Image (spheres, rainbow, N blue to C red):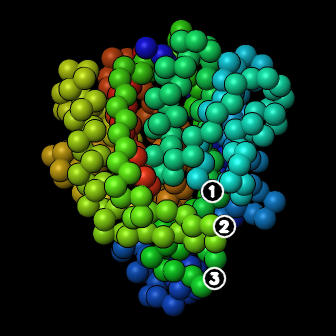
Amino acid sequence: MSFLSATGIYLPAQILTSKELAQRLSVPAHWIANVSGILERRVAGEDETVVSMGVRAAQDCLQNAGMHASELGAVLVSSGSHIRAFPGPAAEITAALGLRGTFALDVPVASAGSIFALALADTLSRQYGNVLVISSEKMTSYAYRAPLNRGIALLFGDGAGACLVRHDQGIARIEATVLHSDGTYVDDLWLNSSGEIQMRGRSVIVHSTEKVPGSIREVLDKTSTAIEDVAIFLMHQANLHLMHRVAKVLGVAESRFFTNIEHYGNTSSASLLIALHEWSRQKGFSRGVPVVLAGFGAGYHWGSALLRGC
C-alpha cells in the first residue's frame, strides 16, 4: 500500500472557446456546449510539446511536494499524442528533470493512461521508493488537422498533470486499484499512422457507460466501502454527458462527480490528473474519507482506484 503525496499541472496559456471553434466547424455557437459540455479548451503553442508540458507539470508537482527530482526512484509517463512512435516521452522528460539512470517507463494508453500509471506506481513504489506519474497530451495537433472532423475537433484540448506516489507517507493512502482491458474493440478508437483520430462515438459511450461503473463497484467491494461514503468521484473528463450517465448507472447525484471539462475539454490521459489536482486544491482529502478515481480509454482499457485521506 502506497500514498499519494502531491499533485501538479501545466496548462497552455492559449484559450480556444467553443464559440470560436464552432465558427471553424460551421456549426451553431451553442452546439459544442450542448453536445459535450465544453465551453473552452487550452491549445498548446507550436513550441510546446508533450515533453515540455510534462516537464512543467512534473516540476509543479515536485515543488508542491517539497522534493528534488534526485529523490525520485522512477518516472512513469502516460501519453497517446507524443510525436515519436518510439522512444516515448518518459526518457526525455526524465532527462529534462536532470536525471541520468533513473528508471523511466512509458504508458501509452490514451485516456485511461493515468489510472494505469497510478496503479503501476502503487506497486513500483515498494521497490523504487518515490514514483512520479506524469500524463501529458497535445491532442489538438491531431484533432485540428484539416479537413476538420467536427465529432473529433469539438472534444479535445491540451495539458499535463502529475502526481507523486510514495511508499511511506502522503495526503491519501492508495487502498486498491482495478485494471481491465479488452482488445476486441481496438478499431473503435485509435490514432492511425497519418495522424487521424478514428472514433466510433456510440460504441465508446456504450462501453464506457457499462465498464466504468463496473470497475468502480469492483474497487468499492475490494475495500468494503459503501458508495454513499465516497466524498467525490474523479473521472477521466471525456464528455460531460458521459459522466452524468455513469453517475446515473451508479445511482449517485451528478454533483458527486467533479467536472472541469467545461474549461479544458478532453485532454485524454492528462484529464484525470488535472482534475485530481484541481479538486485537491479546491476541496482536498479528509482523514479517513474515500475518494474514487476512474478512467476509460482506447483499447479498450479501463480501471478505478480508491484513495482514502490521511
- Separation of marks 1 and 2 at Cα, in angstroms: 8 Å
N-terminal label among 3 and 1: 1
Q: Say what amino acid the circle numbered 1 marks.
A: Ser
Which residue is rendered at x = 64% and y = 71% of the image?
194
Task: Classify 129 as above or below 180.
Answer: above
N-terminal label among 1 and 2: 1
Q: Which residue is mark 2?
A: 141
- Separation of marks 2 and 3 at Cα, in angstroms: 10 Å
Q: Say what amino acid the circle numbered 2 marks.
A: Ser
Which residue is rendered at x = 36% and y = 69% of the image?
201
Which residue is rendered at x = 27% and y = 37% of the image?
216
Q: Which mark is residue 146?
A: 3
Q: Nearer the viewer, residue 138 or 244?
A: 138
Q: Secondary structure at mark 1?
A: loop
- Determine whether label 1 and label 2 are within 8 Å by CB: yes
Answer left or right for 195 relative to 294: right
- Separation of marks 3 and 1 at Cα, in angstroms: 17 Å
Q: Which residue is mark 1?
A: 81
Q: Nearer the viewer, residue 175 or 279?
A: 175
User: Residue 225 location in percent, x, y?
Assistant: 22, 24
Answer left or right for 209 relative to 193: left
Q: Residues within 10 Å of mark 1 (few under 14, many from 20)?
A: many
Q: Which mark is residue 297?
A: none
Answer left or right for 17 relative to 93: left
User: Residue 86 location in percent, x, y?
Assistant: 71, 48
Which residue is rendered at x = 81% and y = 26% of the image?
99
Task: Classify 212 as above or below 66.
Answer: below
**In the rendered image, which quarter contains the C terminus?**
top left
Most distant residue in the bottom direction? 26
Q: Say what amino acid the circle numbered 3 marks.
A: Ala
Q: Nearer the viewer, residue 278 or 161?
A: 161
Q: Residues within 10 Å of mark 3 (few under 14, many from 20)?
A: few
